[in-house]
Image: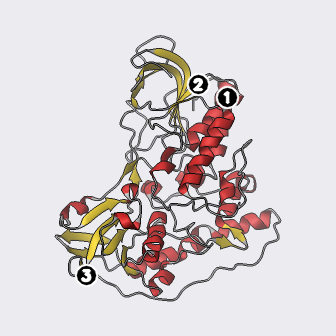
């Protein structure tokens, strides 16, 4: 460990020791590149350590397999709980002898003012000069709570999912979940199972089936991420999005809780989850919701069929795969539109925000970001020679920020580095 305040020079610095940073470290080790991985946390395990107590992967356990370090458990089709995920990646770091320095936060990255190094990093343990920097910031950086939360009365307990731990950590009473992406549906399941009355404000989030044509949806996503391009059926790319802002959209509804199952809000509503539309306004304990619940549920219902099913089917046909027929099912239940709720009158004591995260790259003092705060890059490589990113949303395609795509992206990035001696567009 470097002594605090001591300046030093290192060829390559990787910022962040989550799974993306560790995989890049392994790739750099294989090509003989001197490097260090800086991690602000005191322990390995990345952002998984920040999730709630009963959190589980929404992707099957086999998706945690990495070249040279396969999943070693007894349930490849199950869904790992939080602490096992953390242990898995800690074991991976040990297996590759990752050069990680813990408790080392990076407070600024800027161009060097001269000399052989391109960059100067200010860290909690002193200055580092580097020729190459790979930022492995991950998709979950700063919790996002919309400004409307400030208009809700202080008598109502408010918490972002980032800080939530368990049902018992919330005051007694009903709960309003704001957001209907992956975290939202998983927490609705958990809270209802704990006997809590739950109302969910539904946004414009799509849903994935747990399986399609006999295969887990993540099998399809991995196949499209790794083999799809060779037959013209890759995952959606940033260029394919109708609006660049959709890179910050919610992740499709999926759950790893309990037995393998679809997460269908219509079915959940038929079983007791109260659904309302998008939260529009608040005044004290009175909240107003848009009359768009029916439209949002139709969007969720059509999301997979319109955006992914044709590509999945084309991939199967072009690869000559023999699979069962389309097995998608729809739920017909139509919940009523509710546009006003008085939290106090209905005994709703808590608002739990599952409203996502936003990028937090303000410590990087280089002109490489767009209006959303995401890096402007191609395959992780920016226009600033020597500066690259890994693991951020939509780096290459939909798979770049999750376990089906990060190893692919890291291998391509380090291969470019090894071939050219630098990361350059």
User: What kind of element bears circle 3?
Assistant: loop
On the image, numbered disc 3 is attached to which residue? 346
Q: Which mark is residue 394?
A: none
Describe the element under mark 2 as helix, strand or loop.
strand
Total number of numbered discs in the rendering: 3
Give the side of residue 102 with respect to residue 65, left or right: left
Q: Find disc 2 in the rendering and name its residue.
A: 35
The residue at 38%/59% (across/down) is: 164
Q: What residue would you read off at disc 1?
A: 29
Secondary element type, mark 1:
helix
Gap in Å between the C-alphas at discs 1 and 2? 8 Å
Q: Considering depth in this image, is 250 or 269 the residue closer to the camera? A: 269
Tell me what residue is drawn at x 68 percent, y 27 percent: 418
2 w.r.t. 169: above or below? above
Mark 1 burial class by Cα count in 10 Å: few <14, some 14-19, many 20+: some
Q: Distance between the residues labelled 2 and 3?
A: 56 Å
* Crowd band around label 3 with a 10 angstrom C-alpha radius: few (<14), some (14–19), many (20+): few
């Amino acid at each position: 460990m470097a002594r605090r305040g001591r300046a030093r020079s290192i060829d390559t610095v990787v910022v962040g020791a989550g799974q993306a940073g560790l995989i890049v470290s392994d790739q750099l080790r294989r090509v003989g590149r001197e490097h260090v991985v800086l991690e602000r946390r005191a322990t390995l395990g990345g952002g998984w350590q920040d999730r709630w107590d009963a959190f589980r992967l929404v992707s099957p356990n086999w998706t945690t397999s990495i070249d040279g370090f396969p999943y070693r458990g007894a349930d490849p089709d199950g869904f790992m709980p939080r602490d096992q995920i953390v242990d898995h990646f800690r074991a991976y770091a040990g297996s590759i002898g990752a050069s990680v320095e813990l408790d080392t936060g990076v407070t600024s990255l800027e161009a060097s003012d001269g000399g052989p190094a391109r960059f100067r990093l200010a860290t909690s343990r002193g200055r580092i000069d580097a020729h190459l920097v790979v930022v492995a910031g991950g998709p979950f950086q700063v919790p996002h709570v919309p400004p409307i939360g400030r208009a809700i009365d202080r008598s109502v307990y408010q918490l972002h999912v980032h800080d939530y731990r368990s049902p018992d950590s919330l005051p007694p009473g009903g709960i309003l979940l704001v957001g209907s992406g992956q975290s939202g549906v998983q927490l609705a399941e958990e809270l209802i199972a704990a006997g809590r009355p739950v109302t969910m404000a539904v946004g414009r989030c799509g849903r994935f089936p747990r399986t399609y044509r006999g295969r887990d949806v993540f099998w399809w996503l991995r196949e499209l991420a790794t083999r799809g391009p060779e037959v013209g059926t890759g995952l959606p790319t940033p260029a394919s999005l109708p609006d660049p802002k959709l890179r910050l959209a919610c992740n499709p509804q999926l759950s790893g809780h309990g037995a393998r199952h679809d997460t269908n809000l219509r079915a959940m509503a038929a079983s007791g989850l109260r659904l309302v539309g998008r939260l529009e306004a608040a005044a004290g304990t009175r909240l107003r919701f848009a009359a768009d619940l029916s439209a949002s549920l139709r969007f969720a219902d059509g999301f997979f069929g319109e955006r992914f099913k044709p590509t999945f089917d084309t991939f199967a046909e072009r690869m000559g795969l023999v699979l069962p027929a389309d097995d998608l099912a729809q739920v017909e239940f139509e919940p009523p539109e509710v546009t006003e709720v008085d939290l106090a009158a209905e005994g709703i004591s808590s608002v739990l925000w599952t409203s996502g995260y936003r990028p937090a790259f303000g410590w990087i003092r280089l002109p490489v970001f767009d209006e959303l705060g995401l890096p402007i890059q191609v395959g992780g490589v920016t226009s600033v020679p020597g500066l690259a990113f890994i693991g951020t949303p939509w780096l290459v395609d939909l798979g770049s920020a999750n376990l089906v795509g990060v190893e692919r992206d890291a291998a391509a990035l380090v291969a470019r580095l090894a071939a050219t001696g630098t990361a350059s567009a």
